[in-house]
Amino acid sequence: MTVGNRECGILFADMPRPKAAPNPGCCLHPPLSVPTTARQKEEPAPQPSLGELSASDITHNSTRLSWTVQAGDFDSFLLQYKDAEGKPQALPVDGGSRTVTVTNLTPSHRYKFNLYGVSGRKRLGPVSTDAVTAVVPWGEEVPTAQPRLGKLSASDVTHNSTLLSWTVQAGNFDSFLLQYKDAEGKLQALPVDGGSRTVTVTNLAPSQTYKFNLYGISSRKRLGPISTDTVTGAWGSQMLLPAHVPLSCLSESAPVPLPWTVHGPLYGASP
């Protein structure tokens, strides 16, 4: 800078700059957005549960069972119990039912009933109750138990026959029916009276496998079958004389072929 004939220098000292007042409306880092409501988790449907099982209207051969459901719904129900002979019985019931009548029970017998609820593939429960059937009313006949077959077995097997024997576990049958297929595949049926426990099957083919099925007939019902397999012997493996022809009666008028073997050279044959 020139003043008159002199040059003057002006030194400007560094002055501190005033600090800018903070702007309350300005924000360097905006806040993170937070959802106003959290997502709600889907809660599974409550598992159905059974209530109580009770028996009513008990007679000498039946009873009525009723049950409650505390929560939810079941697809179906399954009632289980053991009969008078100790065999397990199962009775399916639809899911909308709350009662069922059980029949064909035995008089004066205690039963324990177990009820399961089926939901999806799960079986829930059981709930249980006991019931004792009543005695038979005066003058009423007790129905006889259904007869049951036991086992069937084969013995005394020859090349063309076999003896079949069987047992009966309970009751009586009016008759029996034996069925099998012959060597040509044709079905054969042999009726047998109800008092018999054995039968001989003849006219079989040698070296043949046979499957025998035995049915029991009771009041026009065919029960069973029980079965057994057997293989007949080869031809000539066993030759049995008929039981009604004694050896003393053998003659030229009633010849019976007998097998034999010859050891050593034949008579009259040249060495």
Image (cartoon, helix red, strand yellow):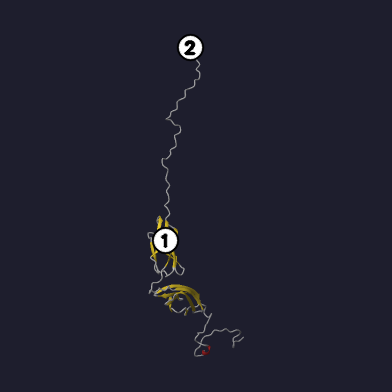
Amino acid of disc 1? Leu
Percent x, y of residue 47:
43, 54
* Image spot of residue 33 (x, y percent): 43, 38
Amino acid type of disc 2?
A: Thr
Tell which of 91 and 184 is nearer to you: 91
Q: Secondary structure at mark 1?
A: strand
The kind of secondary structure element at disc 2 is strand
Which residue in the structure is indicated by mark 1? 53
Label 1 Cα neighbours within 10 Å, binned few <14 / some 14-19 / many ≥20:
many
Q: CA distance from mark 1 to mark 2?
A: 120 Å
Q: Position of residue 132 (x, y in %)?
A: 43, 67
Q: Which residue is mark 2?
A: 2
Q: Could you tell me if residue 74 is visible in this image?
A: no
- Is 2 above or below relative to 247? above
Q: Residues within 10 Å of mark 2 (few under 14, many from 20)?
A: few
Which quadrant of the view contains residue 127?
A: bottom left
Which tag is nearer the camera, tag 1 or tag 2?
1
Q: Nearer the viewer, residue 269 or 122?
A: 122
Whether residue 78 is visible here, answered yes or no, is yes
Compared to residue 269, the image places residue 215 above or below, namely above
Q: Is residue 206 left or right of residue 138?
A: right
Quadrant of image for the C terminus: bottom right
Camera-side residue of 160 and 106: 106
